[in-house]
Image (cartoon, grey):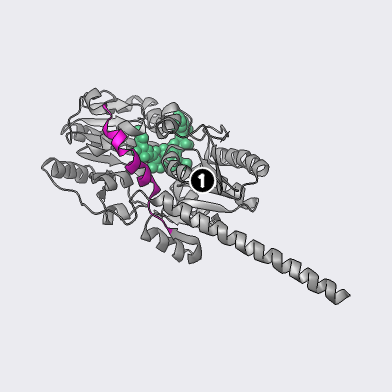
């Protein structure tokens, strides 16, 4: 039996872990997948709600690391994950995306010579000021198997010298979750609850430190949201990092006291997908939301200077607008007057990514077992030859 530790910790990890976990469970005589939750995210709306909605069991191991500086959080995850790896002795660990939990678990496993598989490998923003970029680069350097979601990711890895035999273009695993749960999300009553009309509101999510930890940029965001709210209602489920910054400073009354900006806690997956699907457009700095809007064919304005997901621009509905008020308002006006988003979708964003990964893992472990078996036989033959020689 092949023991795999699936290690996750932050909101965007759970949509990537779920399809793989359920696919692995289809082969109980081959795989024993165990879930490790680092506790990087811990509020109900940032973590548990996804286990409940996706029907995932309780994690097998819960590390409870909580929040902290990068070094503190990374170090704590390494220490606690190492203990589990030492006691469980997995054949491989599987990590997802680009959060601190991804990099910390990869590092801890590598030092114990436990192979690492990285799902969502190869994405690059080419911006090392982003903490996620560091996590991506380190996780990819350490991974033995790199599962990528698009061609440009493969190219990035090859340019960095990764052996092509270790790179597998499998598609976007978040889309597996999206496709699977779309019918359930359609049933959400969130539009009625918030009194929103189909295609007549803007959905916003923002949590990048470069946007929300920087007072100058947060001020620009307040102006952008005000301008948007003068055109149509804005719905803004607030990430805890962003909430902390808005609350800690009385300056943002333009956001907090605006009757046309609806502020909520982070939402569960079904409500959030329903809101994405029916939005006029989405304004975001989230990686996953850039991808989901592309799949759903909903216009997306990304309030960043760069993206590690350029395929959502070339083959999707995404546009990079930074914090440029003029560009953003003209895009909103364009879509309000029936401007159409692109209809293209990237290859393999089809809901079958987990299936592809598991097929590759089965082959990988079957080959490994064959090689080990051959090596074993060779050694026993060698021993006989050696014995005969001694006689
Ligand atoms: C993390 C990831 C980021 C990802 C995002 C998804 C890193 C470096 N960053 O950013 O890539 O896009 O998650 O949402 O891994 N907090 C709570 N409750 C929680 C979790 C966090 O209140 O359940 C607050 C804490 O004050 C914490 C802050 O949010 O200090 C930031 O959390 P953290 O996990 O460090 O980074 P994120 O901004 O969430
Ligand atoms: N999401 C959610 N509720 C929200 C905001 C986002 O369920 O209030 C989902 C979203 O649909 C996507 C994932 O969270 O599946 C994206 O996570 P996040 O934006 O936190 O992280 P990133 O993708 O930027 O790393």
* Front in this rendered view, residue 314 or 210: 314
Residue 174 in magenta?
Answer: yes
The image quadrant where one finds ligand 1 is: top left
Q: Image height check: is 187 above or below 130?
A: above
* Front in this rendered view, residue 336 or 251: 336
Q: Which residue is mark 1?
A: 102
Identify which residue is drawn at 54% across, 55% down.
143
Q: Is residue 214 visible?
A: no
Q: Which residues are magenta?
A: 169-189
* Front in this rendered view, residue 367 or 68: 367
Q: Is residue 206 left or right of residue 71?
A: left
* Front in this rendered view, residue 94 or 370: 370
What percent of the width, then of the height, locates residue 276? 27, 38
Q: Residue furthest right?
A: 391
Identify which residue is drawn at 36% across, 30% down.
268
Q: Is residue 17 left or right of residue 286?
A: right
Q: Residue furthest bottom?
A: 389
Q: Is residue 51 visible?
A: yes
- Label 1 lies in ligand 1 vicinity (Cβ under 8 Å): yes
């Amino acid at each position: 039996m092949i023991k795999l530790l699936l290690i996750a910790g932050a909101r965007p990890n759970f949509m990537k872990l779920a399809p793989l976990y359920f696919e692995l469970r289809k082969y109980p005589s081959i795989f024993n997948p165990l879930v490790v939750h680092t506790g990087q995210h811990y509020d109900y709306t940032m973590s548990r709600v996804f286990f409940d909605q996706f029907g995932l069991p309780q994690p097998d191991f819960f590390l409870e690391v909580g929040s902290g500086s990068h070094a503190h959080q990374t170090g704590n995850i390494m220490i606690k994950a190492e203990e589990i790896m030492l006691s469980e002795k997995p054949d491989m660990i599987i990590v997802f995306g680009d959060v601190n939990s991804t990099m910390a678990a990869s590092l801890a496993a590598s030092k114990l010579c436990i192979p690492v598989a990285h799902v969502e490998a190869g994405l690059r923003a080419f911006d090392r000021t982003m903490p996620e970029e560091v996590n991506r680069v380190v996780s990819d350097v350490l991974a033995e198997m790199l599962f990528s979601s698009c061609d440009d990711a493969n190219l990035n890895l090859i340019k960095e010298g990764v052996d092509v035999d270790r790179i597998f273009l499998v598609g976007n695993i978040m889309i597996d979750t999206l496709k699977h749960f779309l019918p359930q999300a359609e049933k959400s009553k969130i539009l009625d609850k918030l009194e929103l009309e189909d295609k007549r509101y803007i959905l916003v999510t923002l949590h990048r430190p470069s946007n929300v930890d920087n007072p100058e940029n947060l001020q620009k965001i307040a102006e952008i949201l005000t301008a948007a709210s003068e055109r149509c209602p804005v719905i803004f489920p607030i990430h805890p990092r962003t909430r902390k910054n808005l609350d800690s400073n009385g300056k943002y009354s333009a956001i907090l006291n605006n009757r046309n900006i609806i502020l909520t806690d982070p939402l569960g997956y079904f409500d959030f997908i329903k809101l994405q699907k029916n939005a006029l457009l989405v304004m975001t700095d989230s990686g996953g939301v850039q991808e989901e809007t592309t799949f759903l064919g909903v216009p997306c304005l990304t309030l960043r200077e760069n993206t590690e997901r350029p395929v959502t621009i070339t083959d999707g509905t995404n546009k990079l607008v930074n914090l440029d008020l003029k560009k953003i308002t003209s895009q909103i006006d364009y879509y309000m007057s029936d401007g159409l988003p692109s209809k293209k979708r990237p290859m393999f964003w089809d809901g079958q990514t987990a299936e592809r990964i598991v097929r590759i893992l089965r082959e990988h472990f079957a080959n490994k077992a064959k090689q080990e078996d051959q090596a074993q036989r060779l050694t026993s033959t060698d021993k006989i030859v050696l014995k005969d020689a001694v006689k």
